[in-house]
Amino acid sequence: MTILANKTDLVRAGSGTWQDQMKWAIRDLRGLRDVLGLADEGELQHAAEAEFPVFAPLPYLTRITPGDSQDPLLRQLWPSGSEMESPSHFSTDPLGESDATKSSGMLQKYQGRVLLVTTGACAIHCRYCFRRHFPYEQSPKSMAQWEPTLTQIAADDSIDEVILSGGDPLTIVDHSLSRLIARIDEMAHIKRIRFHTRLPIMIPQRVTDAFLEILANARCQMIVVIHANHANELDLSVEQALSKIANSGAMLLNQAVLLRGVNDSLESLKNLSQRLLRCRVLPYYLHQLDPVSGAAHFEVDVKQGLQLVTELRSCLPGYAVPRYVQELRGEPNKTVLA
Ligand code: SF4
């Protein structure tokens, strides 16, 4: 790819539909190196890419400083040779989700809430993803395949919240999403529907009028939990997209993961919280890294995490300080560390 082609890519980053952006995403190391002017790191990096391929949308890439291998946004998607080393307590199913599967595509870890693995597709492949080894092929792919699980939810009035996760549920096209939401929304005992998504950050064009209508017209309280780890992820286009979600009446929360080399400093966490508030998003959770194979190089010691949150609390109002939490397999709730 030439420099001219790089510029063309950057122009394309702000154009097209969100589906175009999914199509135009960079899908290999070579493409990433060309667009961002980065060096080949050798065989181990290639092995890491072979284990978990690259997926990087252009709008997100425009927020990365070309040539900077330490850019905090780049580190989240740049395969590293370190992924090939895994301490023994890191595993392919760090949260025991195989034990939490209650029905096809449905996990239940906590009382009153179920989580639907709606798709294996995402708008970015985060190198630290705790589901990077998840058996997505076992989840339903169509409304007909979802029906037995949905029937089970409809018959269980102990459930009052349905979480749409994945993968990223916003990779599902609006008309299909609308049918799924309508089916859940008609269940009188369901009070809240929650999305776990990175798409409004990766590709702000995903916040379409049709999606906003889904949010605005549902009977249930709609909650959109985004996932940003660094303030640089939230540029003006993202701020505008998030503002539209807020205007729809949905509650907007953020969950971040504490990641070495990305946000493991007071300044970074403080900037993230302040930027989120500016985007009308409440900083909700700061997760301790889940010990998934391939992500050990991102781990920050809990002691350091506690220190950072203590310092954060001393310089921000309480509502701007996320709860520092850890998910432990088999526990009935997340463990609040601070
Ligand atoms: S967007 Fe979420 S599910 Fe997808 S790779 Fe990133 S952390 Fe994992």
Image (cartoon, rainbow, N blue to C red):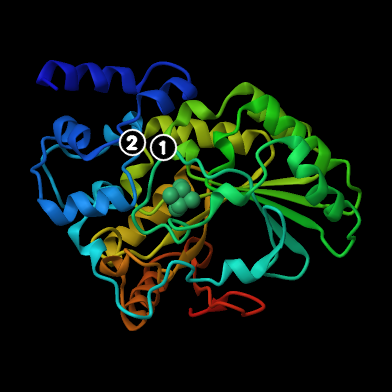
Residue at which label 2 appears: 60
Give x and y (percent) for residue 300: 31, 73
Give residue 239's quadrant in the image: top left
In the image: residue 231, left or right of residue 155: left
Q: Closest to the observer: 317 or 205?
A: 205
Percent of width and height locating residue 290: 43, 69
Q: Residues within 10 Å of mark 2 (few under 14, many from 20)?
A: many
Amino acid at the residue labelled 1: Met
Say few, some or many: other residues with alpha carbon within 10 Å of mark 1 (under 14 / 14 to 19 / 20 or more).
many
- Given residues 258 and 165, the one toward you in this image is 165
In the rendered view, tell whether residue 81 sits above or below residue 216: below
Could you tell whether 254 is left or right of 26 in the image?
right
* Residue at x 50%, y 57% (from the top left corner): 134
User: Going 25% across and 21% down the picture, which residue do you hit?
Assistant: 9
Determine the residue positioned at 75% across, 70% down. 111
Q: Is mark 2 within 8 Å of ligand 1?
A: no
Residue 178 marker: none
Is residue 161 placed above or below 211 in the rendered structure? Answer: below
Q: Toward the viewer: 71 or 187? A: 187
Tell me: 333 left or right of 230: right
Numbered label attached to residue 202:
1
Q: Is residue 189 above or below residue 144?
A: below
The reply to whether discs 2 and 1 touch (Cβ–Cβ < 8 Å) is yes
Residue 110 visible somewhere in the drawing: yes
Disc 1 beta carbon < 8 A from ligand 1? yes
